[in-house]
Image (spheres, helix red, strand yellow):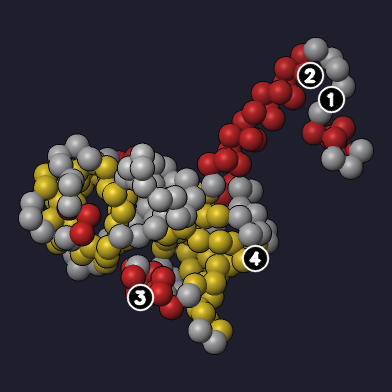
Amino acid sequence: MFTGIVEEIGTIQSIKKGARSCILTVGCKTVLAGTKIGDSIMTDGVCLTATAVGSRYFTADVMSETLNRSALAKLKVGDGVNLERAMPANGRFNGHMVAGHIDGIGIIVDRRRDDNAVWFTVRTSKDILNYIVEKGSIAMSGISLTVANVDDTAFEVSIIPHTLEVTALGEKDVGDALNLECDMVGKYIEKWCERMFRDEKQKDSGLSLEFLKKYGF
């Protein structure tokens, strides 16, 4: 479990490509403290397992499923990536619950300055937008952010200068891809509701989403 509070910007040192997978070597320092082989490090929003740990780097295997669902496939040597170690049981919860399991990719379609803030407009699929709500949380390349606006095609976030300085988001511009993970609480609620309504329908109780909408719920 992670919180979306980036500890360090790592640098991609090497990418060893397989047929449908790859091995990443990430240069870093802060996240190596206390880290051993087998530990989880969220890398640009993706939970990866450290398979080798050096004094200034860690190595991780990335399988085809992860490459297909995330923007890690677009990484190049020299790129900066957001890094965070798994949260300890006695750690502070400064962001929101982040699993490091990417829902999909978003594309930056606009970046504009507004006084001391920078606004990003990110376009993504309807499947992902269904779980994004105004003033809710989203993990964007591993960063816990608050959604400012959302419509049928995109959502917006407003970024303070500190976040741009201490994360790799400061390097991103229009056309760049971002890893997105929606708030998992919404997914569990939807799953629970689907199961409840399915069970009620089997009982022929008349309770359904349409019924609730009709009567103002």
On residue 149, the disc is 4
36 vs 182, left or right, is left
Q: Is residue 37 above or below residue 199?
A: below
Q: Which of the 4 quarters of the picture holds residue 6?
A: bottom left
Quadrant of the rendering where the N terminus is positioned: top left
- Pointers 2 and 1 in contact (CB under 8 A)? yes
Q: Residue at x 11, y 47 (%)?
A: 53
- At label 4, counting other C-alpha atoms closer than 10 Å, the crowd grade (few under 14, some 14-19, many 20 or more) is some
Q: Is residue 48 above or below residue 179?
A: above
Q: Amino acid at mark 2?
A: Lys
Q: CA distance from mark 2 to mark 4?
A: 35 Å
Q: Determine whether the residue tagged by mark 3 lies in a helix, strand or loop.
A: helix
42 vs 125, left or right, is left
Quadrant of the rendering where the C terminus is positioned: top right
Q: CA distance from mark 4 to mark 3?
A: 23 Å
- At label 3, counting other C-alpha atoms closer than 10 Å, the crowd grade (few under 14, some 14-19, many 20 or more) is few
Q: CA distance from mark 1 to mark 4?
A: 32 Å
Q: Which of the 4 quarters of the picture holds residue 27?
A: bottom left
Q: Which of the 4 quarters of the picture holds residue 94?
A: bottom left
On residue 201, the disc is 2
On residue 207, the disc is 1
Sequence-first disc among 3 and 1: 3
Sequence-first disc among 2 and 1: 2
Q: Amino acid at mark 3?
A: Glu
On residue 12, the disc is none
- Nearer to us of marks 2 and 4 is 4
Q: Residue furthest left?
A: 55
- Pointers 3 and 1 in contact (CB under 8 A)? no
Q: Residue furthest top?
A: 203
Say whether residue 154 is visible. Answer: no
On residue 165, the disc is 3
